[in-house]
Amino acid sequence: MTASIAIKFHRCRFVRVKAGACWTVQQALDEQGVEYENVIEPTYPRGKRKDVIEHTGQHYLPAIEFEDGTWYREESKVMAKTIRSGRLHEKAGSAIPR
């Protein structure tokens, strides 16, 4: 189990779609025992994802918001690999600033 990191997991409503981007990252978080708060973002129009757009510069999901106000967003497979390797905490503070 990894160290506890206070994060918000910004994801789509349809996380039950296996192999979808949000499902892939959520599975990695769950497997590693990372505690998180789900933040369900609007499906359409994607322009309503105001926080995600403001802090990542894009409307894509998933995204992770750390307690220090930084954000982490990459392709879901890369995010899942980072989480499974125990390196998620390295993204806090060095990620996209608020």
Image (cartoon, rainbow, N blue to C red):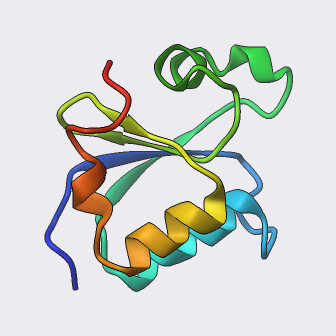
Seen at 72% across and 47% down, the residue is: 13
Q: Quadrant of residue 41?
A: top right
Depth check: 21 or 12 in front?
A: 21
Residue 25 appears anywhere in the view: yes
Seen at 55% across and 76% down, the residue is: 27
Whether 60 is drawn above or below 37: the answer is: above
How many circles with numbers are drawn on the protein? 0
Percent from the top left, x then y, of residue 26? 54, 67
Quadrant (top left, top right, bottom left, bottom right) of the N terminus: bottom left
Residue 29 appears anywhere in the view: no
Whether 82 is drawn above or below 46: the answer is: below
Depth check: 35 or 88 in front?
A: 88
Whether 13 is drawn above or below 53: the answer is: below
In screen coordinates, is 23 left or right of 6? right
Percent from the top left, x then y, of residue 61? 66, 42
In screen coordinates, is 29 left or right of 75? left
Percent from the top left, x then y, of residue 67? 20, 38
Seen at 52% across and 61% down, the residue is: 79
Percent from the top left, x then y, of residue 69? 25, 28
Seen at 22% across and 58% down, the residue is: 89
Q: Quadrant of residue 88?
A: bottom left
Q: Residue furthest right?
A: 44
Quadrant (top left, top right, bottom left, bottom right) of the C terminus: top left
